[in-house]
Image (tube, coloured by chain):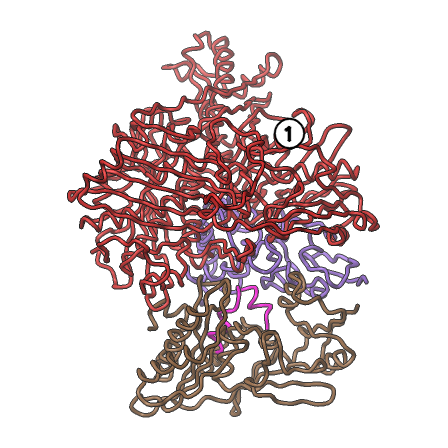
Amino acid sequence: MSESIVLNVNGVPYPVAIDQSRNLLSVIRTEIGLTGTKEGCDDCECGACMVLLDGRPVNSCSYLAVQAQGRTITTIEGVLEGDTMHPLQRNLLDEGGVQCGYCTPGMVMSATALLAANPSPSEEEIRIGLSGNLCRCTGYTKIVQAVQRTAAELAEPAAPAEG
Amino acid sequence: MFAMRDSWRTMSTATAPDSAPPRFVRADGPDKVTGTGRYTADLTLTGMLAAKFRYAGIAHARIARLDTTAARAIPGVFAVLTQADVPDVRYGGMVFDRTLFANEVVRFEGEVVAAVAAIDAATAQRAVDAIVVEYEPLPVVNDPEAALAPDTPLVHPQWQSYGASRQLVRDGNDASYASIAKGDVDAGLAAADVVVTSRYHADGSHAAPIEPRSVVAQWEGDKVTIWSSTQVPYDARAGVCDTLELPSNRVRIIVPHLGGGFGGKCGFHFEAHVAALARAARRPVRLQFTRREEFLAPDRRRESIAFEFETGVQRDGTITARRARLVIDNGAYTADAGFFSQLAAMHALGPYRIPNALAEAHLVYTNHQPSGSVRAPTAPQCCWALESHTDEVARAVGIDPLEFRRRNAVDSGVEGPSGQTYGEIGLQQCLDAAAELAGYGQPLPDDEAIGVAIGWWPSFASPSGAYVRLDADGSGQIVTGAQECGTGAVMTLRQLAADELGMQADDFQLVYQDTAAAPYDMGATGSQTLFNNGRAVVAAAGQVAEQLKRLAAERLEADPADIVLAGGVAHVAGTPDKRVDIAKLAAIAGGGELLIGHGSGAPPDAPELHGSTCVGDVSMAAWVAPQFSCHAARVKVDRDTGVARVLHVSAAHDSGTIINPIAAEGQVQGAVVMGIGQALSEGTRYDEQAHQLNPGLLEYKLQTAADAPPIAIHFVQIATPDAGPRGAKGLAEAPNVATAAAIANAIANVIGTPVRQLPMTAERVWEASLGGAAAAPTAPRTAGASA
Amino acid sequence: MSFTIALTVEEALTALARGARPIAGGSDLVVGARHGKAPLPDHLVAIDRIDSLRTVTVDDGGLAIGAGVSHDTIERHPQIAANWSALADGSALVGSPATRHVGTIGGNICNASPAMDTGAALVVLAATVELASVGGTRLVPIGELWTGPGRTAVRADELCTAVHLPSPPAASGSAYLRLEYRRAMEIAVVGAGAAVTLAPGGTVAAVRVALSAVAPTIVEVDGLPTGDLAAVGEAAAALASEQARPISDVRASDRYRRHAVGVIARRAVLAAARRAGGESIAVPVNRALGIGAAS
């Protein structure tokens, strides 16, 4: 039984007809055709499928697509500002926080959500904030450094905000 | 005191650049960080079907009935295949003991019995469930040590009829026996002041890349293109060609971006199943693994090993002899594990001066998932066991473990345990550096300690090829058979080509991971990409350099031998003003003889061994350009619960020249954290019927960002004979060798006794601290925390 | 099959009365269905947009947490952290940041996992669960809610709408700790919540301890003494180990769980007592004190 719903992904409304049992990840990857969001485990254990729902990180593999209607969904494809990378993306490259890249989109989503909620996180807060995103390649060091550098850069132009 | 003179910041060797190498952004990075990069699972072809497998679900049984009638009748099912539908071919790495589908008998729970291609995954799953399979259970061989006993049922009763490499010594369940013998062990032990005997057991574990594997196959006429998440596209091609009886020029393997491998995606896996389905269905087919399948089905998991050690030592700390016996779990099929016995025997002897040595290793069939190359196969387990044993030996004669290693570890010009005399090596420097970075000897809280371990790993010489060309606009293209699995090794090839041609890495793009486009390379395995394909790229770029020099010489009226390529310009040596832009030369060549180079270069020969005897010799006792390491781990142990937390790891490595510092650091950091997982939380558990109990990421626990400690890194860079380009050796596997061992010694230093089973879970640490089940069956006389 | 989005409790209850099952974040339902634990219900009513279920109210009567309040909200709520600290400790340990955003207190307690991280805290803090149906509302003491692993006293037409916790006594504090093999993405190997009220002079006037992952449901430890803190801690350890009914599974043996739950129970009592004494230990205790430090 299909439900006809509209999903708002990266600012674009997508009408889709889907079974209510479909998870958000599969709908984003197939019906909507955005493959930057990855599937790594299908049970909330790896974070490769992380998207933002109303700005907050959600494992899209374990979230029903029908529940996302009326909400704002942001995927890795929505992080670019035009052709310009988010500072975090640039810093992940400069610091070497990307190896195989499979965890990277989910990591970017978690990290941007973290920085939005907490613009000057401690290293411990960064590590806890990224703890739902498994990375097998990097040992996390360079990813954490990229987030720290991004926080510092984003803090620089404006007056220091309260933590 | 350890000096920073060896660091890359100030190092100098004959071939290395004077200054620090550039820290460049990897070429595939923007694809990956923006989500535009395509992995195999991201590909969709028109008309594509979904594949699903029917697995045995039972570890050992005869197939009494296999009926696919009902499955075939389901609307939307396009193909259902069993072994009856594919050529009757047995394949394997060094023993041809496996067929694509189970053939009369299933030998592990994840064995593929049948495959379905259907209009969508749900339909395919329904069809899989509709396949009728009836089994007559056979005795489950669950314990490798017991499997060697004469009365144990054979996993492969027809083992003698299988084709196999002639070097392998096989006997029943023993799929590969190897020994390395030197001197007279009994005499050496008799001459010792103290003999320490230890037993250890390492559980199996998994590569667990974050990308589950995916395969897409599409036929056009009699040619098939297969997109696969493999680390070794040429091996995968060979597997398809062997099992489907196709010539290699009709099988094209393309690897889109690869989401990590760590050895788990080495070898030939399911490419032929999917190709056969696509041929039968006359449609493209995609196989997409779940995480559970990723744990259960591939023939690449890290092998469990049981160890017995006996080391004789004099009061002054001199090792007189070592005997080691290893039983390695091969699993149900040999995959690529045939060489593990000898490799493990080398690791069980370790990088030590041992005049009298005997290491014996058996690779034993069981009804477990097959073992295969996972990041430095056999080495982390062997290093963990041997280095735990080494600390026991050091304590038995009252010598500090670090000092004990300084006295006994191999060094330049010293003969190792297999009779190889090493050229310039940096192991002693690694010991000094790791200890310094760790603050070895500093006072620590009562529940913390530092453990030290040393490790080694060979460089694998292999044929490898590449093309390099400069197009008319001066932009470069490297076409290589090398495979990028995330390490950055392929990305680093751009730097080698650029250096050869006096250009910038960014001037080059890469075409890679396509067996139809590029010459052979062994793939992302054995840490060999830079070592072998780097040599090929340098040779190919060298040909273009010669072409450029000839062109420049004509225009500058000079001898080609006097032309220097640097900074994007060709100039006459000593006369920088006599110059022409390389881009201009490329434009000229674009209207005439094109700038195309091809390269391979001869791999270095294996070194000679003296005074040793190797049975089951598969060339794993003589190591070209060996890599050395020392890790020191500071660990805190909660004595009440056994929970251990790694607070800091120091990693010192002799991997030769570091060409790409970002990638090199990343390899060490990633491997150390993987090693922490292996040490503490990653281990496969089997029930009595040989079913994996934890085939998922909740119960098979990788370390998270919140667990990973700070890691201090030092690279010892010296001119190793027979190293790869610029003096580089490998680095992808070496940092995975010694971490678990260093953690083990730290834990033992806190609780006063080693933990004899890997992973050293909290429960096992707690039991060991009680002197309970996990403690020593044959504990040494001396124990206790070091100062 | 049907899927409706309820905007009020009344809409949700009407749907439940017609046979729908409630879904909040959905993690347990979706993952459970994928793993064959239980099929996804045919008729679902989404309750995650009902504003009245997403409020936290603190007044003289105590704390009322709407069933739809996320673990993330609980973890960061300053008054919960200060006065009902054990609950904040537990919520802060659930899964990952994403799980804590999506997962709700109502979903957690109705999922009834014996390893849940909020359960022991709710027991020692004397929580009452509000269950509503079209027929009315009833209050169930938390200890009577769970009837087995994955089973509760909630009727099919009932919705958990809120959790009520009384104001804690003066000079009291609470804490929840768990034994974990890694610092995140973890399920309790064993866990213990404790609430301690101190008498003048620092002795224990009242204490409650509850345990997770050592029995088919969260269980409260019986027969705890009062008086000297160290003695109470030791008694909690001994009684917890004695009263635990753990199983052996892939995470731990029963023998180890029985031992470890005693250690964790003692630490929970000591951490709760430190908070009762006015010391500020950040949420969650597991991360604030680290391993071994609370013994």
Instruction: Name the foreground residue: C214 vs B729.
Output: C214
Disc 1 designates what residue? B242
Answer with left or right where residue C101 lies relative to residue C120: right
Residue drawn at point x = 40 percent, y = 87 percent: C224
Residue at x-position 41% and y-position 34%: B178
Quarter holding the C terminus of chain C is: bottom left
Q: Circle 1 marks a residue in which chain?
A: B
Front residue of this view, candidates C77 and B658: B658
User: Between B13 and B548, which is closer to the camera in this rendering?
Assistant: B13
Question: Of B704 and B379, which appears nearest the observer?
Answer: B379
Q: Position of residue C68 (x, y in %)?
A: 62, 76
Q: Is residue B696 magenta?
A: no
Q: Report the amino acid beneath label 1.
A: Asp
Examine the residues drawn in magenta and state their main secondary structure.
helix
Residue A100 in sight from this viewpoint: no
Q: Give above or below for B138 relative to B643.
A: above
Q: Position of residue A36 (x, y in %)?
A: 63, 49
**Residue B160: percent from the left, percent from the top?**
55, 32
Q: Which residue is drawn at the image coordinates 59% and 22% (left, top)? A: B471
Is residue A161 positioned above or below B253 on the image? below
Q: Which chain is brown?
A: C
Q: Which chain is red?
A: B
Helix, strand or loop for disc 1: helix
Q: Which residues are magenta?
A: C87-104
Q: Is residue C95 magenta?
A: yes
Colour-to-chain, purple:
A
